[in-house]
Image (spheres, helix red, strand yellow):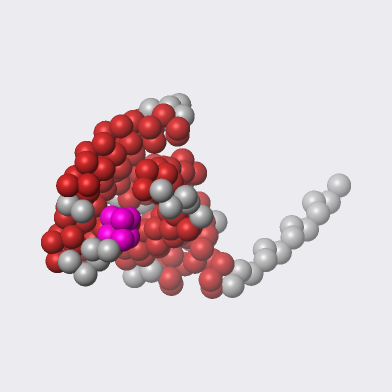
Amino acid sequence: MANEPSKPRTRLRPEQRRRLILDAATAVFGEKGYAAASMAEIAAGAECNVAVIYDHFASKADLQVVLVEELTDELLAHVGSRLAVADSDDADYFRAGVDGFFEYVEHHRHAARMLFREPPAEPSVVAAYRAAGSRATAAVSGFFLAHPEGHADSAEARRIAEAYATMLRSAQEGMTRWWLDHPHTPRAVVVQRLLEFCWTGLANGRREND
């Protein structure tokens, strides 16, 4: 019996191929880390050869930089979408933001591993992680300046908000790393532990600075 002819592969548009490469790279970087990840593994995940990756990205470092920027955009947009429909009460609003953060982590574990592990030493990648951290701090600072309102034009209020945002980011990232090592812990428990650790002090501090 003659073998049936194989079906020709569908030719992907450049943006579709790029998307497949980025998704495969997220999985490989998230699973193995930057240093251990190989372009060959990423190519296998994207169902292309390594040369095709270099048609889209200049280097492994360039690929990582693009991912850090893109995933940071996704994370901030996801949290922002949760806050957009949250109750305006300070505690409820804060809980919605924290839960939105960990909801993203829950559904994007490879991305979270990549974003919140120690960055590689490549200068361009280090710069990308620093820029992503600055953007996240600015976004969280905006929450503290908006709730309660009335102090956004105060230099002191901005300084305090930035300090609180830096502490909250550190707590969230540390809790993320713990959760990735304890994946069976329900998200509600992770959120509650973070709130217990942060909210009392934040609420008291903000009342003192009103």
In this view, the residue in front, 48 or 132, is: 132
Q: Is residue 80 magenta?
A: no
> Does the magenta-highlighted stretch encompass residue 145?
yes
Q: Where in the figure is residue 68, as x and y percent of width and height?
A: 34, 59
Front one among 190 and 15:
190
- Viewer-proximal residue among 18 and 128: 128
Determine the residue positioned at 18% across, 60% down.
Answer: 157
Along the line of sight, the residue nearer the viewer: 17 or 55 = 17
Residue 171 seen in this snapshot: no
Identify the residue shown where x is 27% and y is 60%.
145
Which quadrant would residue 203 be assigned to in this image? Answer: top left
Residue 182 visible from this viewpoint: yes
Q: Which residues are magenta?
A: 144-149
Q: In the image as oriented, which residue stretches furthest toward the right? A: 1
Residue at image x 22%, y 47%?
207
- Relative to 94, say whether 190 is above or below: above
Percent x, y for residue 119?
A: 24, 51
Numbered label tally: 0
Q: Is residue 114 left or right of residue 151?
A: right
> Residue 32 location in percent, x, y?
35, 42
Give left or right: position of 1 versus 31: right
> At 59% from the left edge and 72% from the top edge, which residue is drawn?
13
| Percent x, y of residue 47 | 54, 56
